[in-house]
């Protein structure tokens, strides 16, 4: 779509919301980072089966593939009965980001018995929506509804325990990307929408319409909040380039957001990259991050993009005032692209509960990116990582005096990329913790969903390969 084009929503939605500044969210806890914990050791031993044998999992765990037929699997939701919902970025029909596409559709899938002791069931289509990229997914036990986030909206579907197919057609309850692409867009238009539930509210992450620009659409480059019906929309975070990862802390109810920084920041400010081998690769800024968006009081959290990022750092000339922008609590290297995140419940007691050292911690899925160094190898390596947490604070506070964007977390699932050749074997996306304690990981590059558990693979389990180094 050309810059400046204006979407013309045509969905037959029953409700439309207009964002207003501010939020009514009440913080549940106060983040007080304490630099006391040392992240657990990096993986040493356990490859997964088949193609996944190239991946290495944290020692003391095993895993297997429970789905390989879902196209472009993205965000995940583990349902209380042990089934797993899978959002998908795959879209049938064409669309051009200019507005809702009446001629296209996308589907959310369900994996039955994902928490089974044995193999999970065959994936089935749970619900199809008449819009693109149904990658976002959430569940509310309060409204008994599944929420599906697509390019131009959020849809509600009734859910009853055990449903493997939606009992009614999805209804669009929120419109997003209701205005035009920024008139000075460089063409880096983000098209995905994410959603999570916290109590009686939905939180919705919507990507920007450029790499670096001033948005004119109040529903882009933001995190929005509504009630479970899609009404009473407010803006809880602004100037956040691409808020794909959303995670609700099950203990506090606080919502965490992952933000992707802009490209081509150094050595000079640019509106677009001339090629993959841009100078950003050697500088590594701005860092990407996770931050508790609901812990910033009643005002809208300003993450500063594209003018200010990191620790009030100015990325424009002449300089602007960055003193009031948010300094995120958890940092990761540039281009990490945090697509999925999930807290591990501190009270997990199921058959596959992780060791106590993981209780309350945060898993993040680094998708990596396309940016290459001069050797032609991508500089951002895909990984699933783990952050030890104390409530809503990382146990290792980030030290801005000697910044190290790898200091707060350890690698949990790795070897997605061969760093000698640049060959990739996968890119993690959605994460979810099942009711029995399993960690589920989606991968939209390999087109699979993994199930990870502590201990050793069951004897005679043909679908799991155990390897000891």
Image (cartoon, rainbow, N blue to C red):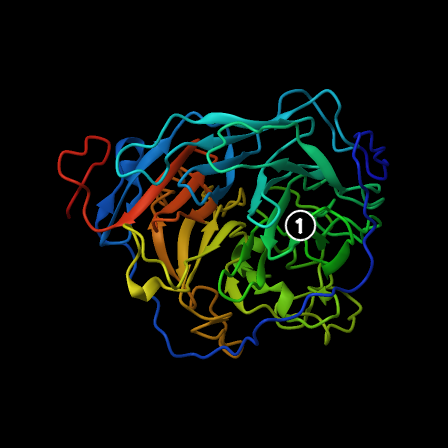
Q: Where is residue 262 in the image (x, y as percent from the top left)?
A: 65, 54
Q: In this view, does 250 lie to the left or right of 6?
A: left
Instruction: Determine whether the residue tagged by mark 1 lies in a helix, strand or loop.
Output: strand
In the rendered image, is residue 259 in sight? no
User: What residue is at 36 percent from the left and 58 percent from the top?
Assistant: 348
| Residue located at (26% from left, 34% from top) | 118
Left/right of residue 285 with respect to residue 182 in the rendered view:
left
Where is the N terminus found, in terms of image quarters? top right
Q: Residue at x 27, y 50 (%)?
A: 351
Q: Is residue 372 above or below residue 279?
A: above
Q: In this view, does 466 lie to the left or right of 8?
A: left
Q: Residue 60 location in percent, x, y?
A: 22, 54
Count of numbered circles on the image: 1
Query: Looking at the image, which is closer to me, 307 or 62?
Result: 62
Residue 80, visible in the rendered structure:
yes
The answer to which image quadrant residue 326 occupies is bottom right
Residue 279 in the figure: left or right of residue 9: left
Label 1 neighbour load within 10 Å: few <14, some 14-19, many 20+:
many
**Horizontal and vertical percent for residue 161?**
48, 38
Residue 279 point in image, percent of width and height: 59, 53
Q: Which of 359 and 443 is in front in this view?
A: 359
- Residue matched to label 1: 204
Q: Viewer-proximal residue, 291 or 284?
A: 291
Quarter residue 467 falls in = top left
Q: In the rendered image of this protein, does residue 162 appear above or below residue 262?
A: above
């Amino acid at each position: 779509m050309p810059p400046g084009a204006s979407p013309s929503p045509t969905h037959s939605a029953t409700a439309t919301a207009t964002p207003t500044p501010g939020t009514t969210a009440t913080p549940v806890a106060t983040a007080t980072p304490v630099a006391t914990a040392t992240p657990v050791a990096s993986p040493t031993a356990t490859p997964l089966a088949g193609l996944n044998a190239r991946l290495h999992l944290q020692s003391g765990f095993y895993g297997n593939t429970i789905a390989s037929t879902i196209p472009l699997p993205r965000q995940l939701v583990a349902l209380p009965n042990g089934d797993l919902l899978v959002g998908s970025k795959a879209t049938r029909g064409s669309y051009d980001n200019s507005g809702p596409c009446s001629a296209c559709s996308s589907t959310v899938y369900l994996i039955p018995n994902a928490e089974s002791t044995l193999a999970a069931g065959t994936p089935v289509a749970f619900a199809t929506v008449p819009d693109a990229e149904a990658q976002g997914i959430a569940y509310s036990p309060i409204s008994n509804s599944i929420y599906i986030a697509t390019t131009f909206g959020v849809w509600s579907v009734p859910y009853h325990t055990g449903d493997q197919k939606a009992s009614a057609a999805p209804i669009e309850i929120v419109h997003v990307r209701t205005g035009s692409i920024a008139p000075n867009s460089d063409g880096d238009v983000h098209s995905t929408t994410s959603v999570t539930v916290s109590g009686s509210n939905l939180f919705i992450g919507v990507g920007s319409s450029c790499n670096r620009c001033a948005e004119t659409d109040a529903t882009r480059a933001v995190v929005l909040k509504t009630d479970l019906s899609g009404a009473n929309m407010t803006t809880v975070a602004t100037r956040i380039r691409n808020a794909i990862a959303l995670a609700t802390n099950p203990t506090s109810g606080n919502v965490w957001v992952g933000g992707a920084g802009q490209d081509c920041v150094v050595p000079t400010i640019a509106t677009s990259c001339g090629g993959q081998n841009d100078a950003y690769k050697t500088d590594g800024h701005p860092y990407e991050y996770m931050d508790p968006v609901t812990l910033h009081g009643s005002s809208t959290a300003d993450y500063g993009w594209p003018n200010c990022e990191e620790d009030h750092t100015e990325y424009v000339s002449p300089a602007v005032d960055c003193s009031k922008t948010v300094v995120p609590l958890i940092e990761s290297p540039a281009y990490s692209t945090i697509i999925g995140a999930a807290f591990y419940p501190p009270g997990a007691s199921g058959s596959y509960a992780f060791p106590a050292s993981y209780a309350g911690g945060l898993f993040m899925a680094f998708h990596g990116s396309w940016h290459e160094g001069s050797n032609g190898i991508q500089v951002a390596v895909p990984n699933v990582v783990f952050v030890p947490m104390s409530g809503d604070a990382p146990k290792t506070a980030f030290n801005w005096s000697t910044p190290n964007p790898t200091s707060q977390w350890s690698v949990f699932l790795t070897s997605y990329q061969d760093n000698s050749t640049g060959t990739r074997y996968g890119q993690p996306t959605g994460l979810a913790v099942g009711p029995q304690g399993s960690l589920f990981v989606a991968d939209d590059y390999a087109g699979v969903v993994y199930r990870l558990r502590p201990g050793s693979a069951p004897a005679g389990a043909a679908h799991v390969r155990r390897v000891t180094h």
